[in-house]
Image (spheres, helix red, strand yellow):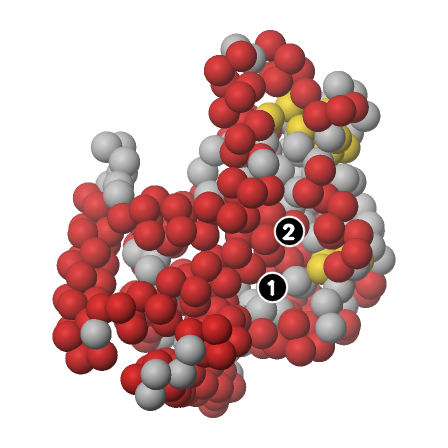
């Protein structure tokens, strides 16, 4: 990492990549939503022809992958990076938010807080994965330890998590939320209810569930996994507020997930998370080029798929050794 570069100098290098290309953005929308719609139509047709659900399931899995791409578009609109127009970003975000069961304004505000505090031990708790330090875990009550163990259990996080996050958690606002956030959630819930009722009337509620639930599970599972592995690896970055550094939080605390080209495409290049956290205004289709053409990023270590699977056992941040550790290491 080049410590000599200031944030201002880095931003100057990255600014050319923040320019959204309207034609490219439209193509990304087209290449995501058209296949997603086609999968829905084909799956509905097959089920209405009494094709067994098991043979339709691969289509639903593919639909989940395109749901991830739709979420990445939604994610970029929340950062205002997908189009130059704020209004276009906002309306596209609301629409893709419906496809991914996520209220635009609520998620946008929470995610921006995540970017402003990622890696800061004193500002945990909004838009991130619940992470305790080893010292906090030792001092916690038995009930809190149990809750944390359940939360970090892979079956709970990746098995129940997709349904809880998309179908339950996203439906409710906190008492402390701003009025705009509460209205965003209420309006999203209302439109989703109308859409579900209309689609159920058109194709049947059972058919709707047989298609939508697997898509939600696959899309949510991949989404949670990506969000998890982006910050929950052994040599990640956590620091107290007084020592917290935005550059280090991006370059050391956000992973460069080295995926095959097809998976990078399906996940909207979110594997270049170190680039995204350093400059969130870069559209996802510019992230790979920015990484390849910027000297600063060439020294960022990559995380392979095999290495990422080992992160599942890492549950606590150990301030003494400055790394994530497993429960057994306590």
Q: Secondary structure at mark 2?
A: loop
Circle 2 packing at 10 Å, graded few (<14), some (14-19), many (20+), is many
What percent of the width, then of the height, locates residue 281? 52, 64
**Residue 179: which quarter of the image?**
top left
- Left or right: 199 with respect to 258? left
Q: Is residue 93 above or below residue 237?
A: below
Q: Is residue 82 above or below residue 47?
A: above
Q: Secondary structure at mark 1?
A: loop
Q: Which residue is located at x 21 percent, y 74 percent? A: 204
- Left or right: 111 with respect to 130? left
Circle 1 packing at 10 Å, graded few (<14), some (14-19), many (20+), is many
Q: CA distance from mark 2 to mark 1?
A: 9 Å
Q: Is residue 75 above or below residue 62?
A: above
Residue bearing the label numbered 1:
270
Quadrant containing the C terminus is top right
Given residues 265 and 279, the one toward you in this image is 265
Do the residues under discs 2 and 1 have CB atoms within 8 angstroms?
A: yes
Q: Which residue is located at x 37 percent, y 71 percent? A: 211
């Amino acid at each position: 990492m080049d410590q000599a570069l200031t944030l201002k100098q880095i931003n100057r290098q990255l600014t050319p990549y923040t320019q959204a290309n309207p034609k490219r953005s439209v193509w990304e929308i087209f290449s995501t939503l058209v296949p997603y719609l086609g999968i829905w139509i084909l799956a509905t047709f097959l089920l209405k022809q009494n094709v067994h659900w098991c043979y339709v399931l691969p289509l639903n899995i593919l639909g989940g992958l395109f749901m991830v791409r739709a979420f990445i578009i939604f994610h970029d609109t929340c950062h205002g990076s997908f189009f130059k127009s704020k209004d276009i970003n906002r309306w596209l975000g609301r629409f893709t938010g419906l496809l991914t069961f996520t209220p635009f304004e609520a998620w946008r505000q929470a995610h921006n807080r995540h970017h402003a505090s990622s890696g800061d031990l004193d500002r945990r708790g909004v838009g991130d994965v619940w992470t305790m330090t080893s010292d906090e875990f030792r001092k916690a009550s038995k009930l809190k330890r149990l809750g944390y163990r359940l939360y970090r259990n892979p079956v709970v996080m990746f098995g129940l998590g997709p349904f809880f996050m998309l179908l339950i958690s996203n439906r409710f606002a906190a008492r402390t939320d701003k009025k705009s956030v509460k209205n965003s959630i209420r309006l999203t819930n209302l439109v989703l209810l109308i859409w579900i009722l209309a689609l159920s009337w058109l194709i049947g509620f059972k058919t709707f569930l047989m298609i939508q639930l697997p898509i939600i599970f696959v899309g949510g599972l991949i989404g949670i996994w990506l969000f998890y592995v982006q910050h929950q690896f052994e040599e990640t970055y956590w620091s107290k507020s007084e020592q917290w550094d935005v550059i280090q939080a991006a370059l050391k605390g956000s992973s460069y997930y080295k995926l095959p080209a097809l998976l990078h495409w399906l996940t909207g290049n979110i594997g270049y998370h170190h680039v995204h956290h350093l400059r969130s205004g870069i559209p996802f289709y510019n992230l790979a080029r920015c990484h390849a053409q910027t000297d600063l990023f060439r020294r960022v270590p990559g995380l392979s798929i095999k290495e990422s699977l080992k992160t599942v056992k890492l549950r606590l941040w150990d301030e003494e050794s400055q790394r994530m550790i497993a429960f057994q290491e306590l």
